[in-house]
Image: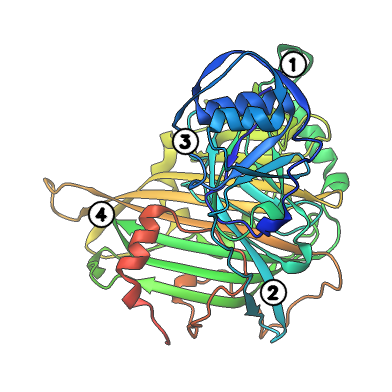
Amino acid sequence: MKRILFCIFCLFPFCLSAIVPDDPVLNKAISLPKSKGTVYEMLNIISETSGMLFIYNNKTLDNNKKAKIEKGKNTLKQAILDVTQKPDLKMKVIGNHILLYTETTEAPKTIPSVQETDSIKQPFIKIEGEIKDQDSFEPLPFTSVTLNDNSIGTVANQNGQFVLKIPDSLKYGTVRFSYVGYESKDIPVELLTEGNMDVFLNIKVVSIQEIIINIVNPLKIVNEMLEKRSENYSGKPLHFTAFYREGIDYKNGFINLTEAVFNIYKHPFYSEKDDQVKLLKMRKISNKNINDSILLKLKAGISASLLLDLIKNLPDFLETEGGSLYNYAKIDMTTIDSKPTHVIAFEQKPETKEPLYKGELYIDAENSVLSSAHFEINPLYIKKAKSSLVVKQSKGMDITPKGAVYTVSYKEFSGKYYLHYIRGDLSFTIRKKGWFFNRSSTINSFFEMVVSKVDTTDTKPFSPKESLPTSKIFSETKYSYDPNFWENFNIIPPEQKLSNEIERISSKIEESF
């Protein structure tokens, strides 16, 4: 099994004078095969042999520089020096990681303090970077980034970029990076602070034996998941802190973008009561250059995010009793959080001609937890779903649904699983009415919500005055802009396209309504 190499493109908060050059780990003898390649590849070989993971600043080593390993036995320290060809390279051992740096490394920045909404100052640590595939260097979108033994977490954006803020009191914890089909990796917080880093994850290969052993009836797997909901999911009220974003994109430009931080009062999974939302922070960016004649308002947003909690609001593809409308098939075994996971595909039966769903369910093979689901409105019947997706449209436009794709995931905390991430991507074709030869164009809408913290103690419902009406179009909510907007709340960083658009139209931020 390959070891993962972490190249951290940042500056590290360690005192350079605190080096222990004769650490027993560095003096450990290892035997290496003769090899040639890049510095990155050779350090991976040393990592595989020694069991240690390397972390370094991109100014310290050039990953693509040619390097080689001579066959034979040597100390771990000398092997590293031979590969890097840097006699001034310094090393510090922390757990199973080795920090590589030089005396020219700049001093790290100090950890900032921020003001929370309750006016109590709480210093926090900010971790940020990009998560990539170990071999291809391609970004891994929507990777889960969570603090172990804690409910604090977030997800990466479509470019694999993430930002995680944690209280300074938890600086000796570990952060877990988890992606479907890949080995999860735990990294000490103290190695990841103050800067931008790349984290490389390794594909988890599922053995043939695991696949053969787990060939079972797919409907049985789904039913076992439903039967164990009371064991795996919380039966008590909860408070979530969540980051939410929604936007509409037309002709490579955003019509609007709305972002917010919520408190959510979550009823138990078996309750039929609607969850409550309390708005903490909000901002909206509007592009006034976009022609208002293409006005489109969607049934998405907050209400859809809450309804997409599949465990609490069972969709028709999870209602298997009394004659299901769907066919199920087990199509694969994969891993989530390094655990073997069934992949169950479902699709409406051929005789059903309504706009139902098709997709995949990811169910943990050990405890029957629904870890994730990816599904869409069946493209064959998507046009029939217009009334369930569109609230308003301009009188002079014909708008037709083109696609509606959804992702839902859950994460474990203290023995129970909680809603973690939700995303919906919807697309529509638009054509002016009465213009037969007029070309159609595409408009895209998305919404996403990540639960960044779970509070299981002293949970109380919100008063009617505090609760936000979730059925209304959220972008029309009135608010006051806060110049210190995010403070220490965890968010999903905007992907490059969205980031560029925010920067381009940042002057359009409405400071008050």
Marks 1 and 3, the one that precedes in the sequence: 3
Vertical comparison of 16 with 458: above or below = above
Tell me if 352 is positioned left or right of 431 in this view.
Answer: right
Marks 1 and 2, the one that precedes in the sequence: 2
How far apart marks 4 and 2 lie (CA) works out to: 42 Å
Vertical comparison of 209 with 408: above or below = above
Residue 123, labelled with which disc?
2
Question: From the image, which quarter does the C terminus lie in?
Answer: bottom left
How far apart marks 3 and 2 lie (CA) works out to: 34 Å
Marks 4 and 3, the one that precedes in the sequence: 3
Between tags 4 and 3, which lies in front? Answer: 3
133 and 222: which is toward the camera: 133
Q: Which residue is mark 3?
A: 138
- The residue at 55%/64% (across/down) is 244
Between tags 4 and 2, which lies in front? Answer: 2
Say what amino acid the circle numbered 3 marks.
Glu
Secondary structure category for the residue under label 2: strand
Say what amino acid the circle numbered 4 marks.
Lys
Marks 3 and 2, the one that precedes in the sequence: 2
Residue 396, image x and y in percent? 21, 62
Residue 80, image x and y in percent? 62, 31
Q: Quadrant of residue 118?
A: bottom right
Q: Which residue is mark 4?
A: 251
**Contact? badges 1 and 3 (CB < 8 Å):** no
- The residue at 58%/45% (across/down) is 56
